[in-house]
Image (cartoon, rainbow, N blue to C red):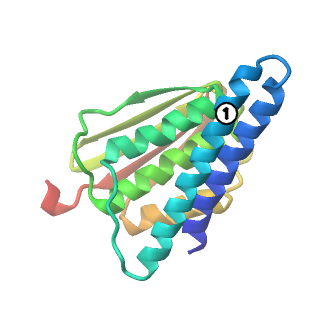
Amino acid sequence: ITRELHDIIGYTFTNNIMMMEAAYAKIQKEPERVANLIALARENASEGLIKIRKTLYRLRDVETARPTSLSRFMKVIELFEIATNVEVETEWGGLIGRLPGPVEDFIYFFIQEGLTNAFLHGGATRVTVRLGSGGNLYHAIIQDNGHGAKVIKEGIGMRGMRERLAALKGRMEIINNDLGFMIQCEIPIPENET
């Protein structure tokens, strides 16, 4: 539950804070952008509320319909780009259709956490999100041009990511250097999907 609350509510509030900060900064210079940022913040809050309701329903074993895997991923990326003005390049590696539910959920939160960390902790201005499959593995990579970190302190988000990945029998590697920060994951493709 703490992982779900962090991933859904924490991300929604973080996005809204970034959009409100951007609106405050633009109110004097670009007032026409402020209305757009406020509308996006409202949409983001509404979507966050829907997501937390879905989580609560899931706790009661009620399943709800979701959009396709890539459309879920793109929605998070587009909202992030608008809120932060950080450019996000995507490479889908031929992935189409639906990923298995637990894999899709992990990648969704992996993208969400990676983008947030790149902006808040790395000061990145450009991020690349790569997804693909090969060798009976799904691959997910997030790389940014931020300043990285001398010491990596894993918070709730990173621990939640590791827990989700462990449940999928996957592995994660963090590469931190002068060129930025990169997190890459490998997740075994379920046997019934190969």
Residue at 58% from the left image edge and 36% from the top image edge: 80
Q: Position of residue 144 (x, y in %)?
A: 58, 30
Residues 131 and 13: in front is 13
Residue at 82% from the left image edge and 26% from the top image edge: 27
Residue at 36% from the left image edge and 64% from the top image edge: 168
Relative height, residue 192 to residue 14 (above, below)? below
- The residue singled out by tag 1 in the image is 37
Can you name the residue that lies furthest to the bottom here?
60
Residue at 16% from the left image edge and 62% from the top image edge: 191
Instruction: Work out whether residue 176 can be spotted.
Output: yes
Instruction: Work out whether residue 177 can be spotted.
Output: no
Q: Position of residue 134 (x, y in %)?
A: 23, 41
Q: On the rendered structure, is 121 left or right of 134?
A: right
Q: Position of residue 19 (x, y in %)?
A: 70, 37
Residues 70 and 52: in front is 52
Relative height, residue 167 to residue 7 (above, below)? below
Residues 72 and 44: in front is 44
Relative height, residue 30 to residue 146 (above, below)? above
Q: Residues within 10 Å of mark 1 (few under 14, many from 20)?
A: many
Numbered circles on residues, count? 1
Secondary structure type for disc 1: helix
Relative height, residue 84 to residue 18 (above, below)? above
Three-letter code for the amino acid on which mark 1 is drawn:
Leu
Residues 22 and 193: in front is 22
Q: Position of residue 185 (x, y in %)?
A: 42, 48
